[in-house]
Amino acid sequence: MSPLELLILLGVATFIAVFAAVPIVWRLTRHDRAVRVRMKAARAQGRHETPSLHPVVDEGLWIGCGECGRGCPEQDVLDLYRHKSVVVDASECVGHGICERVCPVGAITLVIGTETRGVEIPRLTEFFETNVPGLYVVGELGGMGLIRNAIWQATQAVRHAARQPRGASEGAVELLIAGAGPAGIAAVLTAKAEGLRHRIIDQEALGGSLLHYPRRKLVMTYPASLPGVGEFPFREIEKEPLLEYWNQLMLEHGVAVEEGVRFDRVERADGGFVAHTSRGPIRAARVVLALGRRGTPRKLGVPGEERANVPIA
Ligand SMILES: Cc1cc2nc3c(=O)[nH]c(=O)nc-3n(C[C@H](O)[C@H](O)[C@H](O)COP(=O)(O)OP(=O)(O)OC[C@H]3O[C@@H](n4cnc5c(N)ncnc54)[C@H](O)[C@@H]3O)c2cc1C
């Protein structure tokens, strides 16, 4: 074969190879391109980072198996990009922490706040007591989401409170719990089990954030133990039956949540505390704040807005 023929042959072979390779490379990178577009859109709308609970991937640990993305039932939070797990849309995270649990190399942590949009969280002891002795902060208010964490923290806090010298001043309860979400529920059940004289108030009603989940939202949680009750029996349950379960528990244990009572502030008084609420002052030897992080959403003041989950016709 002459050098010219060899050159032509090489040219043709290169041409065919390039022609064949381009569609293959195009197809192989299709997923990454789609993820890149979604990441760009999320970044443009500020959805790539959120001050509420969301996953952070440790690039030093990931192995690119994609288990976290497959485990997360919420769409769009995590995906694989260039063979590594990335957070695409942090705002979609609802904080059930499945990604953290399914990651085989422990590369995922659920965090609150970001480097650029930090949130202030209280400094607490291992019993969730603040630097004011007798004042506890539990659940999401303390910076950590998830129902199982709320239950565990509240249990630890109230058990700790129960181990302190008893005795409340005249007209005071031994424990006031502000907030009746999962943390408040666990706190009041622990108070019952420990024989603490208590009151529990909530500006809305029993259930906490759960009340505001979308209709029939599947709630996922992990084993947790409720004092005086035993093992929390659900791993996956819809919002409505879970609310029913909380209400039933309160009835069975004779706990009455004082609903529609807003906690405004607390101050020291007579060796204990006085909490100022929309229903007047409440005196207590110790106070557990289980207020979550939703704050007090402003209402429109329109008829029917107090009704939960009204389907739109
Ligand atoms: C859409 C969505 C889906 C989620 N899905 C899951 C899931 O599947 N699994 C899971 O483990 N976690 C899930 N989470 C997270 C979970 O709901 C929270 O981590 C958990 O409810 C925190 O419990 P908490 O008791 O600390 O706070 P909250 O549940 O927020 O309860 C706080 C309570 O305090 C009351 N309160 C607030 N301010 C005042 C005041 N000033 N005076 C009186 N009362 C007050 C509120 O009315 C509320 O009842 C989800 C969250 C959201 C938003």
Image (cartoon, rainbow, N blue to C red):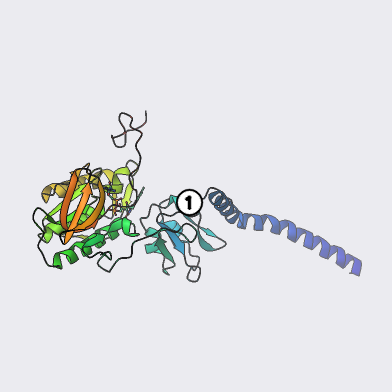
Q: Against 313, is 69 above or below? A: below
Looking at the rendered image, the quarter that the C terminus falls into is top left
Q: Secondary structure at mark 1?
A: loop
Q: Against 257, is 151 above or below? A: below
Q: Residue at x 57, y 62 (%)?
A: 82
Q: Residue at x 32, y 56 (%)?
A: 141
Tell me: is circle 1 under 8 Å from ligand 1.
no
Q: Which residue is mark 1?
A: 76
Residue 132 percent across, percent down from the top left: 25, 64
Outermost residue to the bottom = 60
Q: Is residue 238 visible?
A: no
Residue 76 percent across, percent down from the top left: 48, 51
Q: Residue at x 31, y 52 (%)?
A: 292
Outermost residue to the front = 270
* Viewer-side residue, 23 vs 200: 200
Residue 180 percent across, percent down from the top left: 23, 50
The residue under label 1 is which amino acid type? Asp
Q: Residue at x 50, y 68 (%)?
A: 59
Looking at the rendered image, the quarter that the N terminus falls into is bottom right
Residue 27 percent across, percent down from the top left: 62, 54
> Would you call the spot at circle 1 few (<14 residues within 10 Å), some (14-19), or many (20 or more)?
some
* Viewer-side residue, 8 vs 137: 137
Q: Is residue 8 visible?
A: yes
* Viewer-side residue, 225 vs 275: 275
Callout count: 1
Query: On the picture, is 51 further left or further right than 138?
Result: right
Quadrant housing residue 233? bottom left
Q: Against 107, is 151 above or below? A: above
Quadrant housing residue 260? top left
Query: On the picture, is 307 further left or further right than 57?
Result: left
Query: On the picture, is 264 further left or further right than 46?
Result: left
